[in-house]
Amino acid sequence: SMSLSQQTVKIVKSTAPVLAAHGADITSTMYKNMFPKHPELKTLFNQEHQRVQPGQKYALQPQALAQAVHAYAANIDNLAVLGSAVERIAEKHVSTLVKPHHYDIVGVEIIGAIKEVLGDAATPEIVEAWKEAYGFLANILIKRENELVAERKNAEGGWEDLREFVIEKKVSEASEIVSFHLKPKDNGALPNWKPGQYICVRQQIADGREAQRNYSISCPPGTGKLRITVRREFTDNIDGQVSTALHKLNEGDSIRLTVPCGEFTFTKPSDESTPIVFLALGVGITAMNPLIKEAAKTSNPITILQGARNEEWLAFKDEFEVLAKEDNVTYSTVFASPKDSSLPSQRMTFDYIWSKVPHNGHYYFLGPREWMKDVHAGLSSNGVPASNVNYEFYGPTVTF
């Protein structure tokens, strides 16, 4: 139906505190029960985000889903505030090839997990209310995702599901960071994607299974090719399965991609004297690259501050040095432990950033989670309006 019953709204809202307390137990239980029954869904979810990291009680994906479910329950009487979250999730789902029938599976498993974790506290009334609320949200997302799929498929150069590309060039950008210049195997057109968007790669990994990862498109649209830039991942002595497989590919090999998606894009400030500040740490620079090039078309003052472990880990330096020849662009780098002993060892802390950049700008930042949290907190405590703060997560979105 077009709206939820008042009874459901009341019950779901009243269970928000319970979800704040037990949400991650419920979502962890859901994933634990779902994957053995539906192994095909393992392809759609990064299994790395299902592993509990050292010092954490829950894995990242269950944490992110628990926060999203809690936000839904807390705002069920005012869903307009969730509009931007719905848009972000719909874009991610289209990219990762989530289909309408997957919602039925998740629905069964999440209701099952609510019953399992809450036990007798999950009364028939609560279970019924959550079934209705889940179905309602699922329909909103499915409708939006179907619209996006059709829109992307029907756009010039667009497609649906997976399209085969050929690696035209493989370029080492920095230590463990490689760019792949890709052309459609069918030699057809490419869509005019928005700088800052990402694709999803589906790749066979070492054990013969298929896995998917999202990578930002690291070049501007309109060049007849698409470039992704991939850092080879290592976590707790485990090689990143997809990034390792990709790094082994050679020029001439094929790779399958979904259509560009995402809503982390550049918006030109209404006033051309407003500074635009780009902050990137590590491989965060990949999504920033096309945003920076888009911003450089304006006459606004632009500051690029790029941090890396050392000079060998710095990607795209040559590209940014070319941009910095323009009067309105300032580019500087910062290294935690530089190889060149004449350079200072400097961590990219918020205090350091704030000493180097204009304080009345629009800010775009991307990098490791903990660092992003610090940057977000710093900008916020210095009175920067939320509307001037732009960021995106690699992987599941968690609230700061």
Image: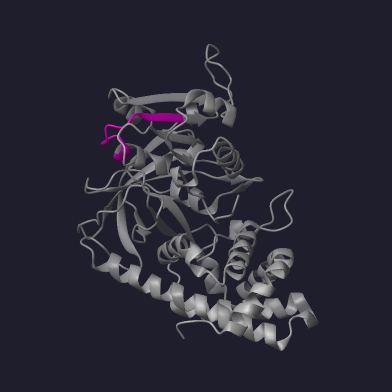
Instruction: Check if residue 298 falls in the magenta segment.
Output: yes
| x and y percentages locating residue 357 in the rendered image | 46, 27
Residue 183 visible, this angle: yes
How many discs mark residues in the rendered view?
A: 0
What residue is at 40 percent from the left and 55 percent from the top? 263
- The front one of 256 and 199 is 199
What residue is at 56 percent from the left and 16 percent from the top? 344
Q: Specify the farthest residue to the right.
A: 120
Position of 264 relative to 312 (above/below): below
Position of 192 relative to 294 (above/below): below
* Quadrant housing residue 106: bottom right
What residue is at 63 percent from the left and 70 percent from the top? 31
Q: Specify the farthest residue to the top.
A: 342
| x and y percentages locating residue 252 in the rendered image | 30, 50
* Quadrant housing residue 268: top left
What residue is at 47 percent from the left and 35 percent from the top? 279
The colour scheme applied to this rendered structure is: one colour
Instruction: Check if residue 82 falls in the magenta segment.
Output: no
| x and y percentages locating residue 51 in the rendered image | 66, 57
| x and y percentages locating residue 34 in the rendered image | 62, 75
Q: Which residues are magenta?
A: 294-305
* Quadrant housing residue 148: bottom left
